[in-house]
Image (tube, rainbow, N blue to C red):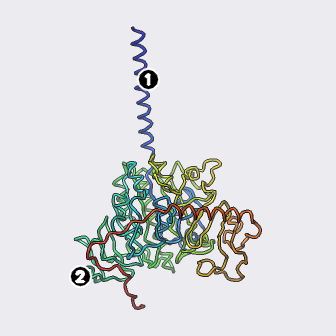
C-alpha cells in the first residue's frame, strides 16, 4: 500500500514538474518574442544611402544601424511600383497571386481583399499591439483600410502624395482644413492634384495634409506608440510618404543641401535615428527587430550602381537598400549577400512571434537563418521570379529576362554608348557585373533554359491560382473620385 502511495506521489510530483517546466518554457518563449518595426521608404534607391556608398545625402543614423546590424545587398521587393510592392510585403505573396494592381489611384474600384492575411493580422492574433503609420496604398475605403486589415490604429496618407482626395472618404467632425479649403468644397467633390488627406483610423482629420511635416509627425506618432506599448509585444509598420514626389521636408531640413531630394533623404535618416533612440531609451532594444527597406528603386535619387530605376525590373527598380537590426541576435556589422525579399518578412516574423501562418498559399520563406548569420545559411529561393512588367528571374548570381535588351517602353532598357545585345533574352552575372551591362545569354544556354522553364512554370502556377481583390464600398451619393483636371503649370 505504502509502495503504491509513494509511487503515486512521485508520479504526481513528476507531472507537476512537467507542467511547470512547460509553463516556464512557454512564458520564456513569450518573453523572447521580439517587437517588430518595419520602416518602408517610398522611392528610395539603392545608391541613396551612405552604407551603399552614397556621397551626396548624409545618412549617419542608417550607417550606424548598418554598423550595429546586418546589411542585405541582394534584397528584392515584389513590384517596381507602389501598391504591388506593399501587397507583397504585407501578405507574403506575389501581388499577382492576390490580383492586386501595381498602382492604385483614388478612383480605384478595388483593394486588398480582407480574406488575405496581413502581417498585422498574424501578429495581432499572436497578442501583439499593431499600428500602421504612413502611406497605406492598398485600398482607401472599406473594407480595405488598415484598421480593417489587422491594425489596431492608423495614421497617415492612404495613397501616394501626388494624388488627390476621394470625396467618398469619411470626414472627421473636427477636420483641420488648410490652404483655403472648405467643407463645402469637399462636399461638392472638389479635388486638386497633390492635395491629399491625412487620416486617423477611417476618418480624414486634415486636408490637404501638410506634407512638409509628415516625416516628423509620423516619427513622433511611432515614438508615442512605442512608449505606450513597451511592456507588451508590438508591431509598428512605418511606411513613409517620402521620398516620393512631390518632395517636402520640415523647416529643420529645408536647404540643408543643394538638392531637395537629399534634404528629404536626410530627414528620413533622422527619423530612423529617432526610432532607434526611442527603442534604446525604453530598454527594449535587445527584444526589438527593426527592418529598413524601400518599396522600389529611385524616382529622383540614385539607384547606382544598379541598372534602371523605379518601374524597371532591372535591379535598380527592385533591389533595395536594406538593413535589419536586433542587438544581441543579429550580428553587428554583418553583411548578407543571399537573395531575400519582402515576401519573406511575413513568414519570418510569424515564426519569431510563435504565430500561425495563413492557411492559403504564400510565396515567402523564413529567412531567420540568414538574419542570424547561421553557418551555411543560403537563400530559400533557388529561383525568385517577378511577373511585373515583362518579367525577371533571379537565381543565385544570375539575373534573367525573358525578353530582348532594348525593348521599347522598359525603364532601364535604354543604353548609351553601345548597341543592345542581339540575343532574344538577357542573362547577367550580377556578381561580376552588378550594373547588368554585358548580356551573357549566348555563353550559358543551360542557365537560360533552366531559368526560362522556371519563369514559365511560375507564370502558369500564379495564373491558375489567382485570388480576388475586394470591391471598395462607396457611400450612396458620394461624388466622383475621377482624376481632377490638369492644373496650369506654375
- View extreme (front): residue: 464
Res 196 → quadrant = bottom left
Q: Residue at x 46, y 51 (%)?
A: 359
- Image quadrant holding the C terminus, namely bottom left
Label 2, secondary structure: give it: helix
Dot 1 or dot 2, earlier in sequence? 1
Q: Relative to residue 342, is residue 104 depicted above or below?
A: below
Q: Residue at x 40, y 63 (%)?
A: 113
Residue denoted by label 1: 14
Q: Position of residue 64 (x, y in %)?
A: 53, 60
- Image quadrant holding the N terminus, namely top left
Q: Residues within 10 Å of mark 2 (few under 14, many from 20)?
A: few
Can you tell which mark lies on residue 448?
Answer: none
Q: Is residue 164 visible?
A: yes
Label 1, secondary structure: give it: helix
Label 1 with label 2: CB-CB less than 8 Å: no
Q: Position of residue 369 (x, y in %)?
A: 58, 49
- View extreme (right): residue: 443
Q: Position of residue 153 (x, y in %)?
A: 33, 60
Q: Is residue 73 visible?
A: no
Residue denoted by label 2: 184
Q: CA distance from mark 1 to mark 2?
A: 74 Å
Q: Residue at x 23, y 71 (%)?
A: 174
Q: How many marks?
A: 2
Q: Position of residue 370 (x, y in %)?
A: 59, 52
- 121 or 334: nearer the viewer: 121
Q: Residues within 10 Å of mark 1 (few under 14, many from 20)?
A: few
Q: Relative to residue 161, is residue 386 depicted above or below?
A: above
- 376 or 419: nearer the viewer: 419
Q: Relative to residue 76, is residue 68 depicted above or below?
A: above
Amino acid at each position: 500500500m505504502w509502495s503504491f502511495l509513494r509511487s503515486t506521489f512521485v508520479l504526481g510530483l513528476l507531472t507537476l514538474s512537467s507542467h511547470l517546466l512547460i509553463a516556464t518554457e512557454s512564458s520564456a518563449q513569450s518573453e523572447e518574442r521580439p517587437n517588430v518595426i518595419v520602416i518602408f521608404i517610398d522611392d528610395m534607391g539603392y545608391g541613396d544611402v551612405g552604407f551603399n556608398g552614397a556621397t551626396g545625402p548624409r545618412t549617419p543614423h542608417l550607417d550606424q544601424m548598418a554598423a550595429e546590424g546586418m546589411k542585405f545587398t541582394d534584397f528584392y521587393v515584389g513590384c517596381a511600383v507602389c501598391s504591388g510592392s506593399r501587397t507583397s510585403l504585407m501578405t507574403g505573396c506575389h501581388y499577382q497571386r492576390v490580383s492586386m494592381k501595381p498602382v492604385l489611384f483614388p478612383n480605384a474600384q478595388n483593394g486588398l481583399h480582407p480574406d488575405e492575411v496581413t502581417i498585422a493580422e498574424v501578429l495581432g492574433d499572436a497578442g501583439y499591439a499593431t499600428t500602421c503609420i504612413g502611406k497605406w496604398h492598398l485600398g482607401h475605403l472599406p473594407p480595405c483600410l488598415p484598421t480593417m486589415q489587422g491594425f489596431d490604429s492608423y495614421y497617415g496618407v492612404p495613397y501616394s502624395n501626388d494624388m488627390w482626395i476621394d470625396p467618398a472618404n469619411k470626414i472627421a467632425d473636427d477636420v483641420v482644413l488648410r490652404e483655403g479649403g472648405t467643407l463645402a468644397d469637399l462636399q461638392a467633390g472638389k479635388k486638386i492634384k497633390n492635395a491629399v488627406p491625412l487620416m486617423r483610423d477611417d476618418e480624414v482629420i486634415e486636408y490637404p495634409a501638410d506634407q512638409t511635416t509628415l516625416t516628423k509627425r509620423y516619427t513622433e506618432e511611432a515614438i508615442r506608440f512605442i512608449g505606450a506599448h513597451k511592456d507588451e509585444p508590438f508591431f509598428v509598420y512605418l511606411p513613409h510618404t517620402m521620398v516620393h514626389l512631390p518632395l517636402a521636408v520640415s523647416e529643420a531640413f529645408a536647404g540643408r543641401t543643394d538638392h531637395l531630394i537629399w534634404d528629404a533623404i536626410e530627414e528620413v535618416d533622422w527619423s530612423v535615428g529617432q526610432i532607434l533612440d526611442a527603442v534604446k531609451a525604453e530598454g527594449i532594444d535587445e527584444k526589438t527587430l527593426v527592418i529598413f527597406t524601400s518599396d522600389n528603386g529611385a524616382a529622383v535619387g540614385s539607384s547606382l550602381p544598379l541598372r534602371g530605376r523605379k518601374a524597371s525590373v532591372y535591379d535598380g527598380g527592385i533591389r533595395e537598400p536594406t538593413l535589419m537590426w536586433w542587438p544581441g541576435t543579429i550580428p553587428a556589422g554583418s553583411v548578407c549577400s543571399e537573395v531575400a525579399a519582402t515576401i519573406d518578412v511575413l513568414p519570418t516574423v510569424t515564426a519569431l512571434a510563435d504565430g500561425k501562418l495563413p492557411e492559403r498559399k504564400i510565396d515567402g520563406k523564413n529567412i531567420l537563418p540568414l538574419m542570424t548569420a547561421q553557418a551555411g545559411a543560403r537563400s530559400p529561393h533557388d529561383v525568385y521570379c517577378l511577373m511585373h512588367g515583362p518579367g525577371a528571374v533571379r537565381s543565385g548570381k544570375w539575373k534573367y529576362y525573358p525578353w530582348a535588351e532594348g525593348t521599347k517602353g522598359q525603364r532601364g532598357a535604354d543604353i548609351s554608348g553601345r548597341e543592345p545585345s542581339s540575343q532574344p533574352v538577357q542573362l547577367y552575372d550580377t556578381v561580376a557585373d552588378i550594373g547588368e551591362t554585358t548580356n551573357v545569354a549566348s555563353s550559358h544556354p543551360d542557365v537560360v533554359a533552366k531559368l526560362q522553364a522556371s519563369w514559365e512554370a511560375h507564370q502558369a502556377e500564379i495564373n491558375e491560382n489567382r485570388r480576388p481583390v475586394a470591391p471598395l464600398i462607396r457611400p450612396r451619393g458620394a461624388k466622383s473620385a475621377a482624376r481632377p483636371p490638369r492644373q496650369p503649370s506654375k
